[in-house]
Image (tube, rainbow, N blue to C red):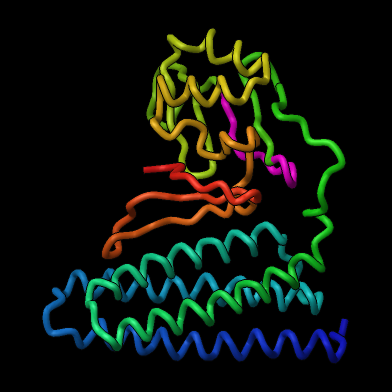
Amino acid sequence: MIPSDSLQDRLNTIGEFLGEINNLVVDIIDLFNNHPILGDSTKKMWISDAEEFLYYLETAWKNLHFTINEEEIYSVKESRDLLLTARSRLAQVTSELESFNNQITRELIQSIRGKFDKCYQLIISELDVISPELQLMDFIPEIIKESKNHYKLPCSVCGEIAITFEVGKGLFDTKNSIIYSGITHSSQLKTEHSNELFSLLEEADLSKLHSFIKEHHSPEGLDAYCPECDKVYCWVHYNAYEVFDEGFYDCTYAICPQGHKRMIDD
């Protein structure tokens, strides 16, 4: 399929932004390489972060381009995940640049953030057009019961599974535990609380479930849950974003569609 002129223009615009971002990444890598104080191991790590950011962004773009031209078909979710990973890597890279605290790095940060945001939105817009799989569902249950030991919490906007609770064994475990998988992490809960947990899941009371997780597992509670909305959101619809400090992960914040902001992982 040959893209229409308007579509081709949009694809060309994305390509132009990618070219500009590529040039900025080259500048960032040069800055890291030539910095007189950074140790070799730090240089290598920070350069790798910058290269990975560009790789994930370019791969998302290539997937979109190939899918539109029907050369290869990639899932929209795969492309979205690549974009989200690119955004995370960029946050990591800009936190590294911020440690230099000078005008050159401040200008680099402002420029690459601005161009990435525009490129990100353009790619997302094209993915929305070609994506039947992300159409909103008419009815989305708060909790889906797969079995007595397996529950899923879907995003209240799109229906994508955001949280799961399931009895099972971890990779190196010999005994069963309750495996919690959210939008920021996966972890294990003690089975001694299983009766209370599964009772709350059966009740489908998200607020009580959130309080239970805060008390027995994580101070942030259910990472995909907005207490003020009393709703669960996937990573995309919770507008989650990671915060880094000189390249090291610090925490994750999220802003729900209603504008409620909170830390969901620390």
Residue beneath the point at 67% across and 20% down:
204
Residue beneath the point at 37% across and 65% down:
92
Rendered location of residue 87, percent (x, y): 50, 66
Left or right of residue 87: residue 63: right
Q: Does the magenta-highlighted stretch encompass residue 252?
A: no
Q: Does the magenta-highlighted stretch encompass residue 157?
A: yes
Left or right of residue 7: residue 160: left
Instruction: Give the camera-side residue of 232 and 188.
Output: 232
Quadrant containing the N terminus is bottom right
Rendered location of residue 83, percent (x, y): 57, 66
Residue beneath the point at 52% across and 50% down:
254
Q: How many labels does the image show?
A: 0
Left or right of residue 122: residue 173: left
Give the quarter of the image for residue 71.
bottom right
Q: Give the range drawn in magenta.
A: 156-166
Instruction: Give the camera-side residue of 255 and 198.
Output: 255
Residue beneath the point at 58% across and 87% down:
17
116 lies above or below 86: below
